[in-house]
Amino acid sequence: MPRPKYVPERIPLVCPCCGTNYNAKHPTQSDSAIMRSNYYSSYGDLYAANEKRLTICKHCVNDLYKRYVNDFGSKIDALYYMCSVLDWYFNEAAFRKIEKIEVDKIIPEYLKKSTVTAKKNPKSFKDTLLENVKRPNEGDVAEISQVKAYSSKWHGEYTAHDLEYLDNYYNGLLNDYKITTENHRDYAKKIAKASWHMDRCFERMMNGVEGADAQYTKARETFDVLSKSAKFAEQTRSTNEVGLGSFGKIVEKVEKGQYIPKHTVLEKDDIDKLLDYFQTINESL
């Protein structure tokens, strides 16, 4: 009697987040069809044997993204975190094209525009990190200062040197000017980024890069516009404003009704008495 053909037990497709059993929900569909319809792709090594599909369903991924947006207070920060967790490639350029649409549509639209689901050139989060490392010459070691990383403070990918420049410029503005409102702080960050970009354009222009002069001119104009709009640009602080700083403090105290010490009359010395004597003689003449 021939042995019965072994049929492997079917592993149910259950989302670990919401607990939905998609086999029970779609009993007539194959596993591949169910996964294509209900699970996003991920080309990382973690999902290679799972038909390159996530184990978390689309509904839960979209819901998690909305929760992370609330946690981080930023769409792009939430997306960067999602990419690191789900082994997706982080493509800032793709996000910028869709950042203004509704939060519910961010993930599916992002996957369409990025190379996450590209069949010819699939990428994972590992590629995000590798692409941001400056390739060393043979025998050299890539310095950590040349590695780009995403900064939630500056909303972009920068090297350690870039972040040092931005932080120093921003802190300089905070020290030199009275920046107390969120609007002014936002302008200060934009001015710091504009200065950083203008500095890079200037270096390319000095190195004779074709078209760099036009880029520098545009970058300088952007910097000037931001500086004037912020109303705390360097050129608005004249010498008179700096020289009258102490007088301005006195006026500010008077307007606030703060105490100003009264002049105390001191006892006259011999010279004062002599001057008064001459004044009396002069009036009697």
Image (tube, rainbow, N blue to C red):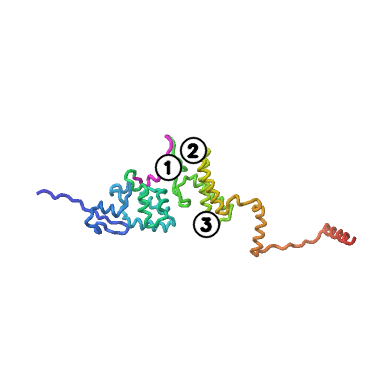
Going from N to C along the chain, the mark reached first, 2 or 3, is: 3
The secondary structure type at the circle numbered 2 is: loop
Which residue ends up furthest to the top in the rendered image? 138
Residue 252 horizontal/vertical position (percent) = 64, 60
Give the label, 1 or 3, closer to the camera. 3
Give the label, 2 or 3, closer to the camera. 2
Task: Identify the residue position indicated by label 3 in the image.
Answer: 183
Would you say residue 137 sits in the magenta stretch?
Answer: yes
Residue located 87% across and 58% down the image: 278
Going from N to C along the chain, the mark reached first, 2 or 1, is: 1
Residue 207 or residue 52, whichever sits in front: 207
Give the label, 2 or 1, closer to the camera. 2
Disc 1 and disc 3: Cα gap in Å? 34 Å
Would you say residue 258 sits in the magenta stretch?
Answer: no
The image quadrant where one finds the C terminus is bottom right
Amino acid of disc 2: Glu
Q: Is residue 202 above or below residue 34?
A: above
Instruction: Decide: few, some or many residues near mark 1? Use Cα within 10 Å; few <14, some 14-19, many ≥20.
Output: some
Residue 41: tell me if it is visible: yes
Task: Identify the residue position indicated by label 2 in the image.
Answer: 210
The secondary structure type at the circle numbered 1 is: loop
Instruction: Decide: few, some or many residues near mark 2? Use Cα within 10 Å; few <14, some 14-19, many ≥20.
Output: few
Which residue ends up furthest to the bottom in the rendered image? 257
Residue range highlighted in magenta: 122-138
Residue 200: tell me if it is visible: no
Task: Identify the residue position indicated by label 1 in the image.
Answer: 133
Going from N to C along the chain, the mark reached first, 1 or 3, is: 1
Residue 158 or residue 85, whichever sits in front: 158
